[in-house]
Amino acid sequence: MHGYEIEQAIRERHIRKWAPIGTSSIYSGLERLEKKGFAQSQLDASQGLPARRVFMITKNGESLLREGAKDFLRRGEYIYQDFSIGMVAYPYLDQTEILTLVKERTQQIKDMLADAETHRPGSGDDVPEHGVWLWKHTYALLDAELRWLESFTAFLEDKQGSQ
């Protein structure tokens, strides 16, 4: 694949919804992979188009990919979010303001879930099995956060009502 094809695949598969990948990082990443022997490239001047550099994964690259993927799949991890940093300041914030901010975040998560629904893999889609499960994982995380936010909102509203 050449860099532009990778960019198209990232856009078509909505990968930027869960992985922050910049266009320039695609090209610099491909160059780094090639320098380290994990990819190789050749110029392709076919179809009357300007020559493009086409990259292929090497055996060492396949090995690195397999080992990295296995490590990511086996390793549990905490999910670090800016929200958690904001919660550290909870005792220093006005309760009414916190409630307003949490409601804003709740709406954002609802919007993100609605957006995810529009990209739900369907039976007629050409989405590989792992793509379907990746979508389900992302959706489940958003849904869990929404449920937690709704519970936290109810707590804050009860607390305000009792004061």
Image (cartoon, rainbow, N blue to C red):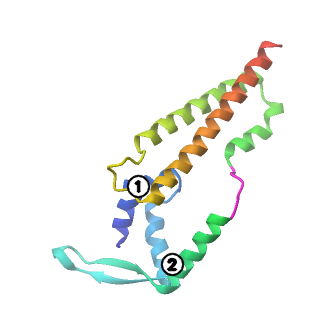
Asked whether residue 63 is drawn in magenta, I would say no
Residue 23 position (above or below residue 42): above
- Please give left or right for residue 27 compared with residue 152 in the image: left
Specify the quadrant that holds the C terminus. Answer: top right
Specify the quadrant that holds the N terminus. Answer: bottom left
Percent of width and height locating residue 160: 78, 17
| Residue under the image location 51 percent in, 54 percent down | 134
Q: Main secondary structure of the magenta part?
A: loop
**Residue topped by disc 1:** 13
| Residue under the image location 34 percent in, 56 percent down | 126
The quadrant in which residue 161 appears is top right
Residue 61: mark: none
Closer to the camera, 132 or 27? 132
Q: Give neighbour class at mark 2: few <14, some 14-19, many 20+ (Cα, 10 Å).
A: few
The quadrant in which residue 159 appears is top right
The magenta segment: 75-80
Percent of width and height locating residue 77: 70, 58
Percent of width and height locating residue 76: 70, 59
